Amino acid sequence: MSASSPVVEFTDVAKRFGDAPPVLSGITLCAQSNEFISLIGPSGCGKSTLLRLIAGLSPVSGGKLLVGGRPPAQEASDLAFVFQEPTLLPWLTVRRNIEVMLRLRHTPADRRRALADEALSLVRLTSLATHYPRQLSGGQKMRVSIARALTLEPKLLLLDEPFGALDEMTRDHLNEELLAIRERQRWTAFFVTHSVAEAVFLSTRIAVLAANPGHIVHEVPVDLPYPRTPETRLSPAYQTLVAKVSLLLRSVEVSTPHAA
């Protein structure tokens, strides 16, 4: 990916499945290097579909989408995807789960071990490397999923509501850890969430989508300094932005009552 060109560029993108009504329409959005863009909106507005388009898991139906200046490719080496569920293999240890993608890419053993060690350290799971998924909490399982993605050394990280099933305290801690990792690795992120507070805490910019079909109705810059800490959540600027985005989201939900 060129440092001067957008990392992701949507131009009037549409998506439909077969003869069904369009899921997305008129998506125009540009992400520069090191941005953290959160996508929020009512259920059914196409947030997850938008991520799948970026990952090359589904083709666009109209318009143009470029990732690193090229059409998206499912096997892109500089992209990683973290899904809603950790999807860990129960018969493998934490370390071997983290190494799965590297094994599929036939990464040499020495390099595989080094990348797994670094990822374990980043997500603070080194002491649990020999544990199995059944021995982990929900938050720890998600850490393993994130570590597995980080071993790919991505320039672009896609996260589809990875913390949605966790309690608020665990989610807050993982938000902070995710940003600490980003400070070290400097990837660009697209993050799907239903939590306005989470979106404001993490993001450089928030895109608010409406449904039927999914389209972007607001883009909100988040001008809060990094690094963000627990104290950030107590600041008037943070609370003002949470209120602002909540109102925007509420207006979208009221105007699209059948989006659930």
Image: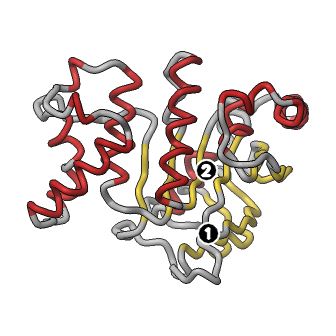
Q: Earlier in the sequence, mark 2 or mark 1?
A: 2
Vertical placement of 155 versus 52: above or below? below
The x, y position of residue 181, in whole percent, is: 48, 48
Callout 2: 10 Å neighbours few (<14), some, many (20+)?
few
Which type of secondary structure does the marked residue at label 2 adopt? loop
Q: Is residue 184 left or right of residue 102?
A: right
Circle nearer the viewer, 2 or 1: 1
Quadrant position of the C terminus in the picture? top right
| Residue to which mark 1 is pinned | 33
- Tell me: 162 left or right of 28: left
Residue at the image point whose x is 64% and y is 75% from the top: 6
Position of residue 252 relative to residue 116, above or below, is above
Q: Position of residue 42 (x, y in %)?
A: 72, 34
Type of amino acid under label 2: Ala
Q: Are marks 2 and 1 in contact (CB under 8 Å)?
A: no
Residue type (three-letter) at the residue carrying disc 1: Ser
Q: Is residue 43 left or right of residue 99?
A: right
Q: Position of residue 249 (x, y in %)?
A: 83, 35
Read off the residue under disc 2: 20
Residue 252 appears in the picture as rendered: no
Quadrant housing residue 227 = top right
The quarter of the displayed image where residue 154 is located: bottom left
- What residue appears at the point 76 percent right and 63 percent down from the top-left corner? 26
